[in-house]
Each structure stands twice: as C-alpha cells, then as structure tokens.
Image (spheres, rainbow, N blue to C red):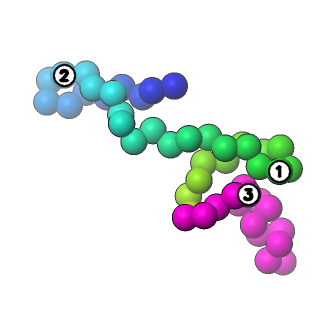
Amino acid sequence: MVKNFFKNGKWIENPNEPAIEICECGNKYIKTRKGQEVCLMCITDVRV
C-alpha cells in the first residue's frame, strides 16, 4: 500500500515505503536494522 501525502499544494506518493517482512516465527515486522532477518521479539529472545 503506497502512502500519499500533501506537499506544496499537491498530493504525492511516498517513495520511501518500508517493506513488511515475515519472520521465521510467523510475526510480521518492518526492517529497522541493517541485515535484520528476524523480528524484534526473536532478537530479544536470543539475547536473553
């Protein structure tokens, strides 16, 4: 889904829409870190 927003009196599409990934555990997540391949819940479970 492309997000539209109003800028300088015109509607434009947001070119920086993030991709939604699916983790191995089945949760959906948005990549927030370089090289991230699992959701944040799985990252915190590994560290604990």
Q: Position of residue 48 (x, y in %)?
A: 84, 77
Q: Position of residue 1 (x, y in %)?
A: 51, 25
**Image quarter for residue 20?**
top right
Q: Which mark is residue 10?
A: 2
Residue at 69% over, 58% down? 37
**Residue 37 on the magenta segment:** yes
Callout 3 crowding tier (Cα within 10 Å): few <14, some 14–19, many ≥20: some
In the displayed structure, does residue 2 sit left or right of residue 45?
left
Q: Identity of the amino acid at label 2?
A: Lys
Q: Are marks 3 and 1 in contact (CB under 8 Å)?
A: yes
Q: Is residue 12 above or below residue 36?
A: above
Q: CA distance from mark 2 to mark 1?
A: 41 Å
- In the image, which residues are magenta? 34-48
- Give the mark nearer the N terminus: 2 vs 1: 2
The residue pinned by badge 1 equals: 24
Q: Identity of the amino acid at label 1?
A: Glu
Q: Identity of the amino acid at label 3?
A: Val
Q: Are marks 2 and 1 in contact (CB under 8 Å)?
A: no
- Give the mark nearer the N terminus: 3 vs 1: 1
- Give the mark nearer the N terminus: 3 vs 2: 2
Callout 2 crowding tier (Cα within 10 Å): few <14, some 14–19, many ≥20: few
Q: CA distance from mark 3 to mark 1?
A: 7 Å
Single out the residue that lies furthest toward the front. 35
Q: Is residue 6 above or below residue 23?
A: above
In the displayed structure, does residue 23 sit left or right of residue 25?
left
The residue pinned by badge 3 equals: 38
